[in-house]
Image: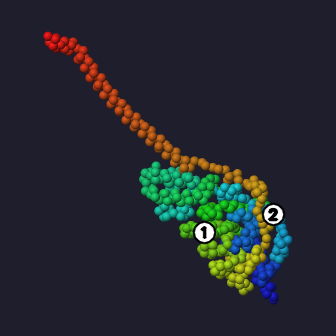
Amino acid sequence: MSSNQEFFDHIQKGYTTKGDFITLGAAMHNGETVTNAHVKIPLKTLNRHGLIAGATGTGKTKTLQVLAENLSEQGIPVLLMDIKGDLSGLAAASPGHPKIDERHEKIGIPFEAKDFPVEVLSLSEQDGVRLRATVSEFGPVLFSRILDVTETQAGIIAIIFKYCDDNKLPLLDLKDLKKVLQFATREGKEELEKDYGRISTASTGAILRKIVELEQQGADLFFGERSFDVQDLCRVDDDGRGYINIIRLTDIQDKPKLFSTFMLSLLAEVYSTFPEQGDSGRPELIIFLDEAHLIFKQASNALMDQIESIVKLIRSKGVGLYFVTQNPTDVPDGVLGQLGLKVQHALRAFTAKDRKAIKLTAENYPISEYYDTKEVLTSLGIGEALVSALDEKGRPTPLAATMLRAPMSRMDILSESELKDLLKKSKLSKKYNEDIDRESAYEILNEKIEKAEAEEAKAAAKKEREKLDRKSSSSRSGSRRSSTTEKAVIKVLTSATFIRGALGVLNKLLR
């Protein structure tokens, strides 16, 4: 038996699956594509998470595009983070190319151009369906972890949330939270101390500074109403294809805190609202996190623990997370150890640090008699990758250097007019793009403070009037006494006795 035939049988045996699957491409041996040696990923294992890694320009985005298309065809909704702005082409069919036909002929799969149902979402001021969440939905624990506050400050945030719950003060946006923090150390200081204990002004000041930092990264646009319902990510079109939800994040690369805040809130909401799936035959939703290092960048230990916990638990809800990044070392070991599917594009060995990273990456893959993993990692071409997955029983599949299939949709972005047309057709825009600013903690406390100030002013005015009245009364009393004295003097001076006496004295003097 030839070595090629042995390799073909090796791949066929390792990637045989009874249930539904996605074909990524065909395995390669000695640098050549082995036609029909298909690398298949069972749908059943796609909620076990995954990694797409590789140097810039090696084809990571196109691999993400291929996975999203095939998932959509299987009726599985997808959520994509479009940080580079190059995924909108999923809404248009590929124009085709002779090189694409040549590639698919080698793989042994006919090429078919297709467009896919796409919904464009936005976290910032970019056009798209607005994604929002309220402060109260985060809860005190998650919000404290996002702000990376001390234990004492986290306790104060818990008190603030409890006070708002007890007094029916809705915490919808950041201005609500800031107002309650200010109220707690000023007008409402005595009220809060009586029921919840003393709150330090220094601690509330520190929390306010953290909130301002979050606001400067655009979080004031994210916090508010109407809250996005994560069930709207799980829609399918009339043909039974899952929607591909693309979040436009091209203006968020320099705002890692906002990005990690959004991702953590989204994953927490999905975990808390999706029903338990158990060991189902297909996932409910697949989330691709492009430029995944942004999630972990500047993340505190508490935040990292939260992310790792959600990654471990969320697969039971039928949700798969796929991290797309340049190097696997960008993903923490605690998360990396949870990943079932690994698609590793070429890495570049320009420095000693690069060579060390390649060595570490190679150790993450199964040993293969057909490949020197370290060598293959630096020799893969564009659109080629090392693939390691899980079979239907959860066992690692054979390592396969794979010629990946081409996307069925456009490998370019939509034009401005095409994007506008797509946004006009959106069924979610009317639901989420209306600005709502209903009465919440900010307005209620302002009204309470104004009422208290008005009552204080009224009391002060009353006190001042009483003071003036007493002064006026005193003045009138003095005036009456003066008038009485004058009258008495005048009466004496004008009396007949006084006049006779005065005339008698005058006569004596004249004599």
134 relative to 10, above or below: above
Q: Position of residue 152 (x, y in %)?
A: 47, 62
Q: Residues within 10 Å of mark 2 (few under 14, many from 20)?
A: some
Q: Is residue 283 left or right of residue 31?
A: left
Q: Give the residue displayed 43% in from the left and 37% down from the top.
A: 461
Task: Determine whether label 1 and label 2 are within 8 Å by CB.
Answer: no
> Which amino acid does the dot numbered 2 rest on?
Ala
Q: Secondary structure at mark 1?
A: helix
225 relative to 101, above or below: above
Question: On residue 296, which mark appears?
Answer: 1
Q: Position of residue 326 (x, y in %)?
A: 67, 72
Q: Is residue 398 visible?
A: no
Q: Residue 271 sits in which quadrant?
A: bottom right
Q: Give the residue displayed 36% in from the left and 30% down from the top.
A: 472
Q: Give the residue displayed 38% in from the left and 33% down from the top.
A: 468
Q: Nearer the viewer, residue 505 or 319?
A: 505
Q: Give the residue displayed 37% in from the left and 32% down from the top.
A: 469
Q: Locate the C terminus and report the quarter of the image it occupies.
A: top left
Q: Disc 2 designates what residue?
A: 93
Q: Nearer the viewer, residue 299 or 438?
A: 299
Q: Locate the N terminus and report the quarter of the image it occupies.
A: bottom right
Q: Nearer the viewer, residue 88 or 508?
A: 508
For marks 1 and 2 on the same chain, the one whose residue lies earlier in the sequence: 2
> Which amino acid does the dot numbered 1 rest on?
Phe
Question: On residue 218, which mark appears?
Answer: none
Q: Position of residue 290 (x, y in %)?
A: 68, 67
Q: Secondary structure at mark 2?
A: loop
Q: Could you give the CA–CA distance between mark 1 and mark 2, rounded to whole angstroms?
A: 34 Å
